[in-house]
């Protein structure tokens, strides 16, 4: 199928399209609602890269900046304290490998990561001093690139069977069951590989709801997995929104990997501080934002199924928004919350939903209900 | 011969990782990305889990995280709220404590501030069995070492 060369190509472009604060970058995403042909995703990504690299060819973007890895040698018995101290004095992280028990030295290496250009030597001195070490421990600095850990974290992604006949398969592996519904994914750095309990809960919910020809809204689309799954189950249209432009790029590529037809899936980046007002069945962006800032999200009461798999706080804040997009009598699914957070969601959403049911896996919960007609 | 933590966890230990991550804002980028990525841990699962568990804290509060990674690529983590000194500095509105504690006063706080801090600290895994009174006493002690005076009420 798709060779590893394509994966490397994707990462090269992804690392250059990661979020940058400059406003010219967010402008590029206005293209998405009117994308004519998803099969041309290759040239699309190139357009984005060309636009963004003109504005952000510097290292102020933390995600693409190189970082420094420092290996510090110290005694085993002071290592925990030194790790804590390093964090207080400027290190981003401090890790220690477990030594194999056959080695008898009493020394251990701490690997520490520093993201900012700072005097690493001074930081280590302060840390050592604060815990009473007489001299600064020996250390070695290496400069690492972002792509190293990105590629390593991808290696932990394997095919997952959600339920009988439904598999999520990484782009670089062959599906174990060719006859099953296989969703091919290259998740990049966006959420949704099928392995997390909340993704499973939402996929199972979708499977039970989609009968054919529905309109589906994936609020917080991440890798686009739910939107793609809905289409594979028979929905007519999937719309995926996210606050992270990275996720939208990812979802686009995944849609192409699954041979989704151009008209079937649309995307939109939603800025986090956007305030909507709803009037006469349409949504309007706040004040000085242009109306097409909302892209595909201008029509309310359009969707038969809406699923939002995000986090407790945004779910509470955006309840009105999420509900507004569902048709009366449509189903709304809420996930990304722990079981202990469920009562807050129930309180907030019971105003708008009836026939509420809850499913749980491993301490994570998914709540679904039917939108009341009187809202 | 297995170590104590390995015996308790029933799994061979790979590494321990310490990080500071803002509450509700874990992303697959530094510091989380490189630190977990180098051990092939599932980044997104950690971010989702961490963000969900820290929803109750004020957004972007720097949380101290300790991750225990096992050889089978699974992991567990505990989250602690920021250090008492961080809360005290924030409450008093100062960048650092007084250089000469006991002689020079950096700032003043009231008992109400201490009580609020103690309430947050009580949800830490290490403080759950302590009474609010004993947590408050310990916080007042820390404040004194930083040169912050604690008064019953602001005059």
Image (cartoon, coloured by chain):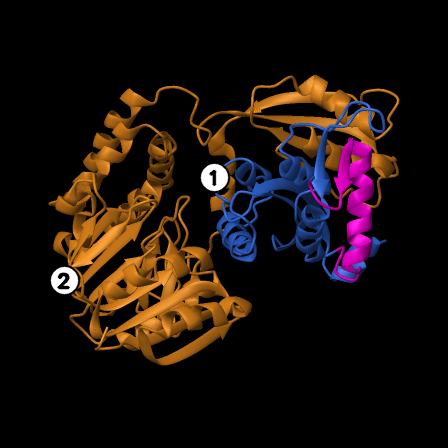
Chain colours: A orange, B blue
Q: Which residue is mark 2?
A: A281
Residue A66: x percent and y percent? Answer: 50, 25
Quadrant assignment, res A211: bottom left
At x 30% / y 62%, what residue is drawn?
A: A320
Does A118 appear above or below B143? above
Is residue B123 left or right of A264 when viewed as pictured? right
Q: Quadrant of the C terminus of chain A?
A: bottom left
Q: Is residue A108 visible?
A: no
View extreme (bottom): residue: A355
Residue sitting nearer the eye, A40 or B119: B119
| Disc 1: which residue | A151
Tell me the magenta residue range.
B126-154
Above or below, A286 against A64 in this view is below
Q: Earlier in the sequence, mark 2 or mark 1?
A: 1
Tell me the subunit letter for badge 2: A
Q: Secondary structure at mark 2?
A: loop
Q: Nearer the viewer, residue A217 or B114?
A: B114
Q: Residues within 10 Å of mark 1 (few under 14, many from 20)?
A: some
Q: Does A53 appear in magenta? A: no
Question: Are the numbered discs 2 and 1 placed on the same chain, yes or no?
Answer: yes
Does B151 lie within the magenta span?
yes
């Amino acid at each position: 199928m798709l060779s590893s060369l394509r994966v490397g190509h994707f990462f090269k472009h992804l690392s250059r399209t990661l979020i940058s604060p400059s406003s010219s970058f967010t402008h590029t995403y206005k293209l998405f609602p009117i994308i004519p042909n998803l099969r041309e995703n290759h040239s699309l990504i190139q357009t984005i890269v060309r636009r963004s690299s003109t504005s952000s060819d510097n290292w102020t973007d933390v995600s693409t900046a190189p970082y420094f890895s420092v290996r510090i040698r110290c005694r085993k018995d002071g290592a925990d304290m030194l790790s804590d101290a390093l964090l207080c004095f400027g290190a981003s992280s401090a890790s220690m490998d477990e030594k194999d028990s056959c080695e008898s030295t009493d020394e251990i290496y701490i690997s520490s990561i520093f993201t900012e250009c700072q005097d690493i030597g001074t930081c280590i001195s302060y840390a050592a001093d604060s815990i009473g070490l007489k001299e600064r421990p020996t250390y070695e600095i290496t400069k690492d690139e972002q792509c190293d850990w990105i590629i390593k974290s991808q290696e932990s992604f394997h095919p997952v069977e959600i339920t009988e006949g439904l598999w999520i398969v990484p782009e670089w592996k062959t599906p174990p069951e060719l006859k099953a519904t296989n969703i091919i994914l290259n998740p990049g750095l966006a959420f949704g590989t099928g392995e997390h309990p909340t993704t499973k809960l939402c996929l199972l919910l979708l499977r039970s709801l989609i009968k054919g020809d529905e309109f589906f809204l994936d609020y917080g689309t991440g890798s686009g997995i739910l939107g793609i799954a809905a289409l594979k189950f028979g929905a007519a249209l999937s719309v995926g929104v996210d606050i992270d432009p990275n996720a939208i790029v990812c979802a686009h590529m995944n849609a192409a990997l699954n041979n989704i037809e151009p008209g079937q899936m649309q995307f939109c980046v939603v800025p986090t501080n956007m305030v909507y007002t709803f009037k006469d069945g349409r949504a309007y962006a706040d004040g000085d934002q242009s109306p097409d800032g909302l892209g595909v999200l201008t029509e309310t009461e359009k969707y038969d199924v809406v699923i939002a798999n995000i986090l407790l706080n945004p779910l509470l804040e955006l309840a009105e928004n999420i509900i507004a997009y569902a048709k009366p009598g449509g189903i709304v699914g809420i996930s990304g919350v722990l079981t202990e957070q469920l009562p807050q969601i129930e309180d907030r959403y019971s105003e708008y939903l009836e026939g509420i049911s809850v499913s749980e896996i491993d301490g994570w919960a998914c709540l679904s209900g039917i939108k009341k007609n009187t809202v | 011969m297995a170590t104590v933590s390995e015996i308790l966890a029933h799994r061979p230990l790979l590494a321990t990782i310490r990080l500071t991550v803002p509450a509700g804002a874990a992303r697959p980028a530094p510091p989380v990305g490189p630190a977990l990525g180098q051990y092939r841990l599932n980044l997104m699962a950690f971010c989702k889990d961490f963000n969900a568990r820290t929803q109750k804290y004020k957004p972007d509060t720097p949380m101290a995280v300790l991750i225990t990674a096992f050889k089978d690529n699974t992991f567990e983590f505990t989250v602690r709220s920021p250090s008492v000194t961080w809360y005290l500095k924030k409450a008093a509105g100062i960048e650092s404590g007084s250089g000469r504690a006991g002689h020079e006063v950096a700032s003043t706080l009231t008992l109400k501030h201490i009580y609020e801090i103690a309430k947050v600290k009580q949800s830490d895994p290490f403080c759950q069995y302590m009474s609010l009174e004993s947590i408050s006493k310990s916080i007042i002690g820390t404040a004194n070492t930083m040169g912050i005076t604690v008064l019953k009420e602001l005059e």
